[in-house]
Amino acid sequence: QVQLVESGGGLVQAGGSLRLSCTVSGRTFSRYVMGWFRQAPGKEREFVSAISWSAGTTYYADSVKGRFTFSRDNAKSTVSLQMNSLEPEDTAVYYCAAAETGYGATYYYTRRPYKYWGQGTQVTVSS
């Protein structure tokens, strides 16, 4: 059984920064594409970012491009999302997720390939 545990959420003022982390246990971490999604109240869960198993390729939603950076450490089975220049619109519960490799890049922008999910961590950005 694969388990994902997020940490690092909190309350921050607009323009500030937060760093989310996700630790994976239970399977060979390096075999997974890892993703971050977020869900604001009353809205659908949306894609934020994804990273290939080798960390050679990262993908970002247009809304966070240039502000967020996704990284992974396969030796520690951990991924991190550095979030800078935060805006009130970034307020949401952020979820870490793991997907099998082998799909086309655009597929990882959807929820469908992600088999395992964390419990979520709240990020609140005040104006």
Image (cartoon, rainbow, N blue to C red):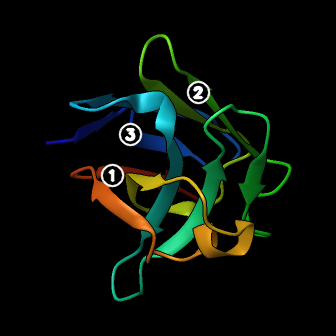
Who's the residue at 72% across and 66% down the image?
105
Who's the residue at 60% across and 67% down the image?
108
| Mark 2, residue position | 72
Q: Is residue 18 left or right of residue 83?
A: left
Disc number at residue 21? none
Which secondary structure lies at badge 1?
Answer: strand
Q: Is residue 82 above or below residue 77?
A: below
Residue 83 at x, y percent in the picture: 64, 41
Of the two numbered discs 2 and 3 in the rendering, the one whose residue sits closer to the viewer = 2
How dense is the environment of label 3, judged by Cα within 10 Å: few (below 14), some, or many (20 and up)?
some
Who's the residue at 49% across and 37% down the image?
31
Of the two numbered discs 1 and 2 in the rendering, the one whose residue sits closer to the viewer = 2
* Of pointers 2 and 3, the one earlier in the residue sequence: 3
- Residue 61, image quadrant: bottom right
| Mark 1, residue position | 122
Which secondary structure lies at badge 3?
Answer: loop
| Cα–Cα gap, marks 1 and 2 | 21 Å
| Mark 3, residue position | 9
Quadrant, the C terminus: bottom right
Q: Is residue 36 left or right of residue 59?
A: left
Q: Which amino acid type is shown beneath numbered disc 3?
A: Gly
Residue contact at pointers 3 and 1, CB within 8 angstroms: yes
Q: Is residue 109 above or below residue 26?
A: below
Taking the view exactly as shown, the residue that stands out farthest to the right is 66
Residue 70 at x, y percent in the picture: 66, 38
How dense is the environment of label 1, judged by Cα within 10 Å: few (below 14), some, or many (20 and up)?
some
Residue 100 at x, y percent in the picture: 46, 54
Looking at the image, can residue 89 be seen?
no
Tell which of 74 and 7 is nearer to you: 74
Quadrant, the N terminus: top left
Tell which of 82 and 115 is nearer to you: 115
Q: Which amino acid type is shown beneath numbered disc 1?
A: Gln
